[in-house]
Image: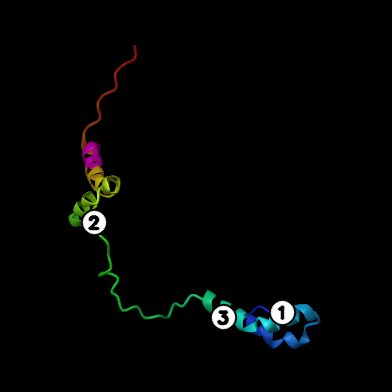
Amino acid sequence: QYETVENLYSQIDGMDKGRIKNILMECKKDVLMAKKLAIILTNVEVPINPNDAGFFWFDDKLNTYLLQLEMYSLSNRIFKKQTDKIKKKEEKSEEPKPQLSLF
């Protein structure tokens, strides 16, 4: 009916319901702040070049540090994936073995 919060407050004098009107008047500052917080700003300048912020892979220093802290499972999860990808590529390149006959 009002479409925006500003329209609601500009037409609040014409509202019939006293309780709702009173609540809206008491919370006007909070309602306007909530609207301001809910709006996503898209016109903000970001001083970072997206190409410089790229992530390529973890450094081996991290692996050494994780092993030093005895975080073996985390180290395996991070660094084993890299070696698994290489192994999968090698396995795919092998020729498939012929299937044996069941009879």
* Local crowd size for mark 2, using a 10 Å CA cut-off: few (<14), some (14–19), many (≥20): few
Disc 3 secondary structure class: helix
Contact between marks 3 and 2 (CB within 8 A): the answer is no
91 falls in the magenta region: yes
Which residue lies under the disc numbered 2? Answer: 58
Contact between marks 3 and 1 (CB within 8 A): the answer is no
Left or right, residue 42 beside residue 15? left
In the figure, residue 4 lies in which quadrant?
bottom right
63 falls in the magenta region: no
Residue found 66% across the figure and 78% down from its top = 3
* Local crowd size for mark 1, using a 10 Å CA cut-off: few (<14), some (14–19), many (≥20): few
Residue 60 is tagged as: none
Which residue lies under the disc numbered 3? Answer: 33
Mark toward the start of the polypeptide (3 vs 1): 1
Closer mark to the observer between disc 1 and disc 2 = 1
Residue 102, above or below 67: above
Residue 47, above or below 77: below
Dot 2 amino acid type: Phe
Residue 23 is tagged as: 1
Residue found 23% across the figure and 36% down from its top = 91
User: Which residue range is magenta in the image?
Assistant: 87-92
Mark toward the start of the polypeptide (1 vs 2): 1
Dot 1 amino acid type: Ile
Mark toward the start of the polypeptide (3 vs 2): 3
